[in-house]
Image (tube, rainbow, N blue to C red):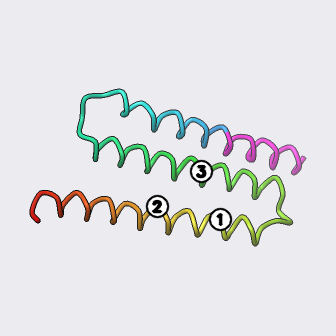
Amino acid sequence: MIDVFINVASYGCIVVGLIFWFWGTLPLLGHRSVLFKLHSLSVADTLGSMSIIVGLLLKIPKEWPLLLLALISLSIWNTVLGYVLAYCSNEGRHG
C-alpha cells in the first residue's frame, strides 16, 4: 500500500515538473520585455526541475545524497544567475 502511494507521489511530482517546464515557455510567446520572459522562464524551469528531482528522490531514495546536492546546486545556481542578469541589465541603463 505504501509502495503505491510512493509511486503515485513520485510520478505526480514528475508530471508537475513537466507542467512547470511547459508553462514557463508560454511567456516567451508574448510581447513583454526580454527580462520578464527570462524571469518567467527561469522560475518555472527551477520549480519544474526541483519537482522532478523530488519525484526521483521518492523513486530512488538510495541516491539521496546526489539528488540533494542537485537540489541545492539548482537553487543556488538559478538565484545567482538571476542576480547577474539583473545587474547586467541595470548596468546597461545607468552605466
Q: Please tell me how crowded label 3 is: few (under 14), some (14-19), or many (20+) other residues with Cα within 10 Å.
A: many
Amino acid type, callout 2? Asn
Residue 86: x %, y % from top left: 27, 60
Disc on the earlier residue, 1 or 2: 1
Nearer-the-camera pick, 63 or 6: 63
Neighbours of disc 1 within 10 Å: few (<14), some (14-19), many (20+): some
Q: CA distance from mark 1 to mark 2?
A: 12 Å
Residue at 9% over, 63% down: 94
Highlighted magenta segment, given as a residue range: 1-14
Find out whether residue 3 is within the magenta segment.
Answer: yes
Q: Nearer the viewer, residue 13 or 46?
A: 46
Left or right: 1 with respect to 20? right
**What amino acid is labelled 3 in the image?**
Ser
Sequence-first disc among 3 and 1: 3
Whole-percent x, y for residue 67 in the image:
72, 64
* Kind of residue indicated by mark 1: Ala
The picture places residue 52, in percent across and down from the top left corner, at 66, 49
> In what element is the residue under mark 3?
helix
Give me the disc on residue 78.
2
Residue position for label 3: 49
Q: Which residue lies at the image location 45% right of the left edge and 38% below the top edge?
A: 24
Say which of 78 and 64 sits in front. Answer: 78
Q: CA distance from mark 2 to mark 3?
A: 11 Å
Q: At numbered mark 1, what does the secondary structure look like: helix, strand or loop?
A: helix
Quadrant containing the C terminus is bottom left
Residue 75 part of the magenta segment: no
Q: CA distance from mark 3 to mark 1?
A: 10 Å
Is disc 2 surrounded by few (<14), some (14 to 19) or many (20+) residues within 10 Å?
some
Residue occupied by mark 1? 70
